[in-house]
Amino acid sequence: MKVVRVLNQAEGIKFGFGERDVVVSESMAIADAERIQGDYPGVYVAVVEVVDEPAGAAAKAATRGKQ
């Protein structure tokens, strides 16, 4: 799953994409974030891949060694 990470306190900065404005935030569209990342790498946003663990595996890892 891809998620948006806001870099350098860029939350709230507006970009004009044609006739629409896009506001930088962690909830913005991935495609918009990827476009900004492509134009300004490492400045405003980073789109990262996050691996989801099954709920059981996460719980098991959290309790490992506590027995």
Image: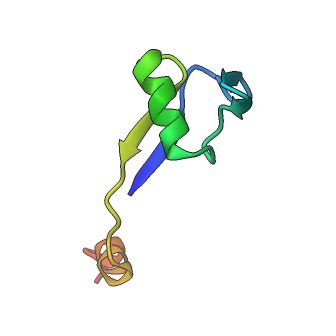
Front residue (pair 50, 34): 34
Q: How many marks?
A: 0
Q: Quadrant of the N terminus?
A: bottom left
Q: Could you tell me residue 26's position as x and y percent? A: 60, 43
Q: Is residue 42 visible?
A: no
Q: Quadrant of the C terminus?
A: bottom left
Identify the residue shown where x is 35% and y is 74%. 58
As drawn, is 54 to the left or to the right of 43? Answer: left
Q: Is residue 3 visible?
A: yes
Identify the residue shown where x is 45% and y is 17%. 39
Q: Is residue 15 above or below residue 2?
A: above
As drawn, is 28 to the left or to the right of 55? Answer: right
Residue farthest left in this picture: 65
Identify the residue shown where x is 65% and y is 32%. 24
Describe the colour scheme in one phrase.
rainbow
Residue 13 lies in quadrant: top right
Residue farthest front in this picture: 19
Q: Could you tell me residue 54's position as x and y percent? A: 33, 77
Identify the residue shown where x is 62% and y is 43%. 28
Q: Is residue 8 above or below residue 45?
A: above
Front residue (pair 51, 36): 36
As drawn, is 41 to the left or to the right of 26? Answer: left
Residue 10 lies in quadrant: top right
Q: Is residue 2 above or below residue 67?
A: above
Residue 25 lies in quadrant: top right
